[in-house]
Amino acid sequence: MENNSPKTPSGEQQKEKKKGGALVLWILILLLAGGNGVLAWFYLQEKQRADKTEVIIKQVFIERDNVKSDLLKVQEEYATLQTNDAKVNKELDEKRAYIAELLEEAEKHKGDAYVIMKLKKETETLRKIMKHYVYTIDSLGQLNEHLIAEKKSISADLNKEKDKSTNLSKEKEDLQKQVDAAALLKATNFKALGVRTKSGGKKEFETTKASKVEKIKVSLSFAENPLAKKGNRIAYFRIMTPDGKEMYKSAENTFTFDGAKGYFAGKQPFEYNNTEIGITSYCSNSGEKFVPGKYMIEVTVDGSVIGSTSLVLE
């Protein structure tokens, strides 16, 4: 008779089954360990990236604070500049308003590295321009002191001569001033252009790009004046650069104007015969590159400044 009862696994089959289960378990453990390693690597990468971003942001905020502090100092320095000259006062008010705008930009874009860098350059430019205003205000102050001293001297002389006709002396003095003023040359059509040359200097081109300018071409006309002295004269051109320096081709190029000494960037001899005459001069900057900004130009004849203009280069 056949035995139909189920067969039980043998001992070897049970061992093989246990080994298979252990192998699967180890594979699962290795997979979990590998997955955790990958996750840990991604976590470290993201943390490093976040740390770098945080450092950059901190640096931008520090730079913003430095720029803002510099702007506040420049604002205080501009606030101390005072003069009675209406034109200079107007320019100073414009600069003060511009500084206030820059401070607002610094606060508005405190996390923008590009804007902060731009504001830093603008702050440096404003400080350089301020030196020009300090020089101009100082020159005006010296001129005022000279006029005050001259007035005191005249008053002392008048007091010594009080037995004489004071009114007549004063009228004579005023008349002489009017005659001297009437005899001065009058500059008209005063213009300045940035120029560069080609073809060995044979062709001349006008440009407003500071990087391309080789010389500043200045031209003007002297109006007809029958009271002016005839003869040979020299026109001196004094140019103040945007950073407050006087342009000159050579350190020996000095001249006297309004009782002071300075450098001239160009000069042009001419003969005046009481009729209108035009002149042109080319002014160089002793080999230095021209910088963007506003150039202030004056013309002096016979020791007196008789005209001025300006040129803005980009």
Image: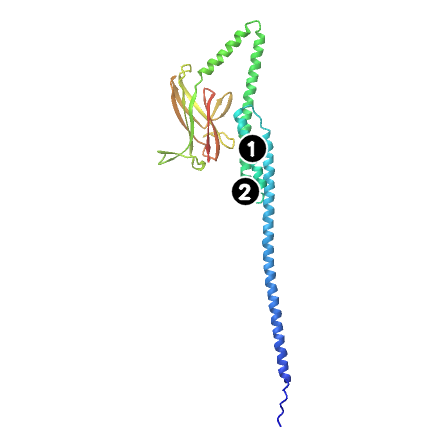
Report helix, strand or loop for mark 1. Answer: helix
The numbered disc on residue 241 is none
Q: Nearer the viewer, residue 61 or 176?
A: 61
Residue 211 relative to residue 83: left or right: left
The residue sitting at 58% across, 38% down in the picture is: 104
Q: Nearer the viewer, residue 177 or 259?
A: 177
Displayed quadrant of residue 285 = top left
Q: Residues within 10 Å of mark 2 (few under 14, many from 20)?
A: some
Residue 204 lies, in percent from the top left, at 37, 33
Disc nearer the start of the sequence (2/1): 1
Labels 2, 1: front one: 1
* Most distant residue in the bottom direction: 1
Residue 263 lies, in percent from the top left, at 48, 27
The residue sitting at 62% across, 66% down in the picture is: 33
Q: Is residue 277 above or below residue 313?
A: above
Residue 34 relative to residue 184: left or right: right
What amino acid is labelled 2 in the image?
Val
Report helix, strand or loop for mark 2. Answer: helix
Circle 1 sits on which residue? Answer: 97
Residue 73 lies, in percent from the top left, at 60, 34
Number of marks in the rendered image: 2
Q: Measure the C-alpha gap from mark 2 to mark 1.
A: 19 Å
Displayed quadrant of residue 82 = top right
What amino acid is labelled 1 in the image?
Ala
Residue 131 lies, in percent from the top left, at 55, 31
Circle 2 sits on which residue? Answer: 115
